[in-house]
Image: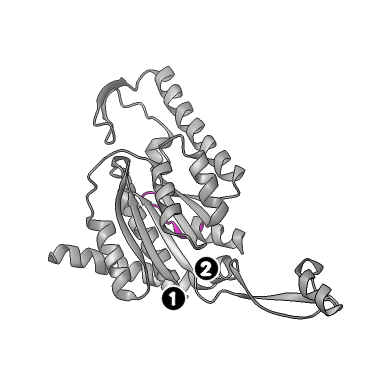
Amino acid sequence: MDESIIKKVRKIEIKARGLSQQMFSGEYHSAFKGRGMVFSEVREYQYGDDVRNIDWNVTARLAHPYVKVFEEERELTVMLLVDVSGSGRFGTHSQFKEELAAEVAATLAFSAIANNDKVGVILFSDHIEKFIPPKKGRTHILRIIRELITFRPQSNGTDISGALGYFYNVIKKRCTTFLLSDFYDTGYADALKLAAGRHDLVALRLVDRREEHLENLGLVKFYDPESTETIWVDTSDAAVRRMADAHYEQRRQQTEQLMKRYGIDMATMYTGEDFVAPLRNLLSRRS
């Protein structure tokens, strides 16, 4: 491996491991552990037991109330669905969105293995670019980090629906899933609903501040990394700026409403800014 790549991997490992150990270990456990419960045994009903847990078949057979006992699953599978489309190669505050995605994903991965969970990754553009099956261990996590910072997708487009459909088909058992994307896509509502129905799905929206508001920079040539098209825009025109800002705001609201509709927690993180606070707030809400 190239020496510069080794240094990048090591740098992200140190930062992600530190954040995971110091800040997220407790929150991660309380936010995700215990959401998957497995049947353990039945025992006689005791005062105060939840009547919804009564096993009516056993109760009828023995003529005495019995309840089902569940225990917390000791091991979870965590899946990271990472958008590697062309729009990720944008950033005006010290890093690109794809670099922010790598740091966030690495931090979540270290939090997972610290809690004895498996971690897997799906990198997607407008098709599945790479699937790394869930495993444990530091070597596995370092491979994930290496892929996140060195991978070059074959395509520039975005197909969230296709990524969620692939994920739904390859991961049958319920797991905790983080979808990292700027969500510059449409038509994925049905796939989102299906995936959220089986899995514990969390959306992490990664954006750059300059995407929120178009500044007055005069005549500017814009390049779309997904369509590879270019266009000249007169940003000195106030009407043009208002239209661009309104389009961004409409897209943001549509994404938030879609997540709320299917009960999916979401946090927004910005390039060049600390992602600790929004991630901790997300975990605190879930706890």
Specify the quadrant of the image occupied by residue 260. Answer: top right
| Quarter containing the N terminus | bottom left
- Where residue 182 sits: x, y (%)? 41, 43
- Mark sitting on residue 166: none
Q: Is residue 269 left or right of residue 92?
A: right
The residue sitting at 38% across, 18% down in the picture is 237
The residue sitting at 25% across, 57% down in the picture is 149
Query: Does the residue at mark 1 contact the one at mark 2 (Cβ under 8 Å)?
Result: yes
Q: Is residue 79 left or right of residue 10?
A: right
SS category of the residue bearing label 1: helix
Q: Is residue 242 magenta?
A: no
Count of numbered badges drawn on the protein: 2
| Viewer can see residue 266 | no
In this rendered view, identify the residue nearer to me: 150 or 276.
Answer: 150
In this rendered view, identify the residue nearer to me: 114 or 91.
Answer: 114
User: Which residue does the numbered mark 2 point to in the structure image?
Assistant: 28
SS category of the residue bearing label 2: helix
Q: Residues within 10 Å of mark 1 (few under 14, many from 20)?
A: some
As drawn, which residue projects farthest toward the left?
Answer: 2
- Where residue 120 sits: x, y (%)? 38, 63
* Amino acid at pointer 1: Ala
* Amino acid at pointer 2: Tyr
- Where residue 154 sits: x, y (%)? 22, 45
| Viewer can see residue 61 | yes
Q: Is residue 274 above or below residue 138?
A: above
Q: Is residue 275 magenta?
A: yes
- Mark sitting on residue 114: 1
The segment highlighted magenta reads 270-277
Q: CA distance from mark 1 to mark 2?
A: 10 Å
Predominant secondary structure, magenta span: loop
